[in-house]
Amino acid sequence: MDTMNPFENPYWKMSLKAFEDSQRAFTSFASKMNADHSSMQAVATDAADAYARYVQECIKHPWAMTKQSVGVGKNYFRVMKQSLFQLMGREVDSVVEPEKGDMRFAHPDWSANTWFNFVKQMYLVTGQAWLDSIHNIPGLDDHARTRAEFFVRQLVNAMSPSNYLLTNPELVQLTVKSRGKNLLSGLERFVQDLEKSADALKISMTDDQAFELGTNIATTPGKVVYRSELFELIQYTPTTEKVAERPLVIIPPFVNKYYILDLSAKNSFVRWAVEQGNTVFMVSWVNPTEEHRNLGFDRYVTEGVLKALEAVEEQTGVREVNAVGYCIGGTLLMTSLAYMAARRMKSRVKSATLFTTLTDFSDPGDIGVFVDEHTVKAIEDQNNHKGYFDGRVMAVSFSLLRENSLYWNYFVQNYLKGESPVPFDLLYWNSDSTNITAACHNDMLRRFYLENQLVKPGAYSVNGTKIDLSKITTPLYFISTHQDHIARWRITYEGAKICRNNSTFVLGESGHIAGIVNPPAKKKYSYWTNETLCDSADEWLDLSEQHSGSWWTHWDEWLAPNKGKQVEARSPEEGKFELLCDAPGTYVKRTLGVNN
């Protein structure tokens, strides 16, 4: 029996503690937003402006809106009629169904219960009508239409009845059954996430305690052989008696951590490359703080890529390497090649492979909705104030590009159901955010995304040297993916055409991560090849040949002529450098959390 004093009841103690913790977390979160000169305010202003332009066009074109309203009204009437029939016990067909793969309405009561079925269908009709009106209304240019569609989509999906307690049948049943304990558990998780967030709520997607770098993730054996202010250089332990003469040097993106290419033994590109007889080196970028504020993109070239290549030569005695760049790491590699060409430096790179790499930023993918003068200026001001762009904010921004599966799904699971996130190595990596230096992020936003300088000969300078990507003569292998929403393949194809005489372009299935991290053993997906770089990407695809399985084997065949002769395997211990520590090193282990 409960005690006479209700505040001695464990349930009430838990409730009181949750309330006190939430007050503290909200206060802390609000102070961080105010102190950081939050760029979120600029994004909110842009959202309002985009919607205002949409409304203006609706007013200018009343006939288009009238036609749409008639269709929507008919659907509303059909939903109400079907709901009445269902209430009378008759079997009815849905007026509208969720899109394939939409799991928000998977619970059977969304269809079996008349009220929840009515709520679901009214929501789907309204949301689709709203989005259709943006596509159909005349007068909006492509950029304005894309921005309006993105921000309205965010609002539509945020307002989904699946995200709210009283309009979600599964949540109602769970709350009644647990007597509200799911909500108290969820509030506790919400407070924990709020305390670890920057100026946007970063929802936990996986169990952070389930993984330890070097133990069950990023486990390929190796040693850190070089360390600078900007990066650590890892040399991996060979597994073959003979290796290719030329080392393989991987330049990962500095906006994420490198171990996306070394998640686990079964899907590690690093381990697979070692097994193919390569001496593999990995650049592991520092997770920057305020003290790194002045490290711009050009210094990532001169003090990052070029220093890494020098270190590899000193460690192995081999000047030329085969290099791989992933995402913005590929952009960095291409910039480095152009810089070496402009300086007439003897090339250190025999071949370069570019994973999902943008050099032409005229179509920067979904992230382009955040790129305009107003938002970029606000982000620059915030970066200059803090000394870096907070990686947790970037993580939230990318999650909102796939908001239903990567944001609201976890909002419901963690905070309303009160469930613990399950261990998942890919989501652990995705949540392991890294900052970007103020100078580098400002460079990228303004000079690449806003002004698209990199593809304009002489427009972009590295350390005072103007560069021209078309002067690169190194053999290039571009691999992009068909469903990539970050580096869309048609625009990465335009980058390949800049050096069309020395470029090979390959297109893989799936997206930005799954299409790249696709080991041959999985026998998953397929890829397209076409040795001719046609004028248009669509023409290239029409004339291409599709192959089943992973593109990794095709790349290895392409790389073979550039590997050089076979030599005795090189272990890290045999090099010129003193070994600093075991892989994965120290830089990769710096995380962003409560005290950042």
Image (cartoon, rainbow, N blue to C red):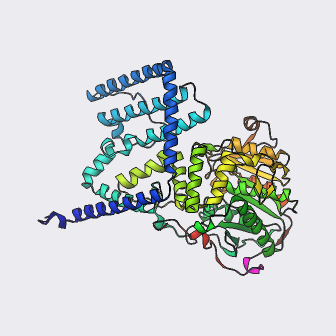
**Residue 429 seen by the camera:** no
Please give the name of the residue rendered at 76% of the width and 68% of the height, measured from the top-left corner: 307
Quarter of the figure with the N terminus: bottom left
Q: Quadrant of residue 182?
A: bottom left
Q: In this picture, is 214 found above or below 65?
A: below
Q: Quadrant of residue 72?
A: top left
> For this view, does 340 lie left or right of residue 116?
right
Query: Magenta stretch containing residue 136, yes or no?
Result: no
* Place of residue 246 in the rendered image (x, y in percent of width and height, measured from the top left): 82, 66
What residue is at 30 percent from the left and 43 percent from the top? Answer: 166
Q: Is residue 527 above or below residue 387?
A: above
Relative placement, left or right, of 195 versus 328 is left
The location of residue 117, given as percent across then percent down, is 34, 34
Looking at the image, the residue that sits furthest to the left is 4
- Residue at x 72%, y 68% (from the top left corner): 281
Q: Nearer the viewer, residue 523 or 425?
A: 425
Q: Residue at x 66, y 58 (%)?
A: 440
The span picked out in magenta is 571-579
19 relative to 489, above or below: below
Looking at the picture, tell me which residue is in the foreground, 323 or 133. 133
Residue 219, percent across and down?
A: 61, 70
The answer to if 574 sits in the magenta stretch is yes
* Closest to the observer, 133 or 493: 133
Residue 204: where, in percent of width, then height?
Answer: 45, 58
**Residue 399, visible in the rendered structure:** yes
- Left or right position of 214 against 2: right
Magenta residues: mostly which secondary structure? loop
Q: Count the marks: how many?
A: 0
